[in-house]
Amino acid sequence: MRTGDGISASLLDALRNEGLHTVEGAFAYAGGRRMTKPGLRHRARVRLELIDAQGQAHELYMKLYGRQPLAARIRQWLTHRSGSSPAGIEWANIQVVRSAGIRTMRPVIAGEQPDGTEAPRSYIIVTAVPGRKIEECMKGFLDANRDRPGVMEEFTGELAELVRKLHQAGYVHRDLYSSHVFLNEAGEGRELYLIDLARVFAPRWRRTRWLVKDLAQLKSSLGMEEWAGAWWSRFLQGYLASDDPRVLGRWRRMVDRKAALICLRPRRRMARAAR
């Protein structure tokens, strides 16, 4: 069992009171709100709302990882070169992303049962991040700043810096969709947060392929021709730290090809379902 740095004793007590300080308790927990999504298979996600003894409310998210099929365990070892549990890998990924200077959730508690047990399982609980997914709020943000190009340029530069920091640290996200980047404007300044770090890894081969995939996922998932048409070149300039038209043109072509393939996937699934 591990707990995150700086997590209050009152929050840990609240988790213990709910039985969420053990693997068995986490998997038996019947509270919270289950968050279903296609493709979870042996995984589950639960939104938690706890109030500690001090009366403070905590919004948390729990991921439960059941027994992995053998093929999934082999892929995990080949990708991460680690025998750690999925929750342990996600815990480490949060530390990596935070060390790269990127805002993200805080790890609260995690536990695992090793492969030698009858049913190896693991779980992790993390804090929520403030703000809203840019997938949901980008149109409103654009509308609010239509006559403020300076704000849009700053935002685009900040988004490019977030991705650049991750890639410069040697890692890729693999699910860098706009639903996994949060924009918070509630404080004095604008903040971006990156979430859903379970698949983050450091590629050893074909690194450019993985970088392009991250960028294409972000561009295609925004689905905002207005933003992409006006600001994607500025995004690439910030990400690449280059104004060289040859460099920018090469990356634009690579990303656009991959983004086009990503956009085709839902159509292909719909076509297969209609047969």
Image (tube, rainbow, N blue to C red):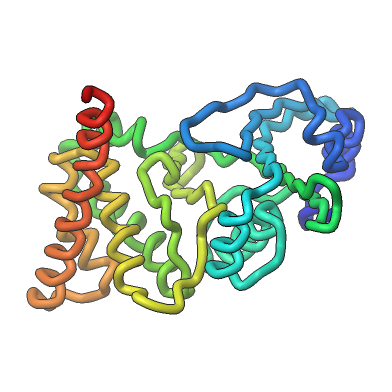
Q: Quadrant of the C terminus?
A: top left
Residue occupying image coordinates x 66% and y 40% = 63
- Closer to the camera, 92 or 114? 114
Q: Is residue 269 visible?
A: yes
Q: Is residue 110 left or right of residue 190?
A: right
- Closer to the camera, 124 or 84? 84
Residue occupying image coordinates x 46% and y 74% = 170
In the rendered image, residue 266, in percent from the top left (x then y), is placed at 26, 35
- Closer to the camera, 73 or 143? 73
Residue 174, quarter of the rendered image: bottom left
Residue occupying image coordinates x 65% and y 30% = 46
Query: Would you place residue 38 above or below residue 231 in this image?
Result: above
Residue 94, quarter of the rendered image: bottom right
Query: Would you place residue 79 above or below residue 87 in this image?
Result: below
Q: Is residue 154 left or right of residue 100?
A: left
In the rendered image, residue 238, in percent from the top left (x then y), is placed at 26, 66
Residue occupying image coordinates x 65% and y 49% = 68
In the rendered image, residue 78, in percent from the top left (x then y), is placed at 55, 69
Q: Is residue 99 visible?
A: no
Q: Is residue 106 left or right of residue 215?
A: right
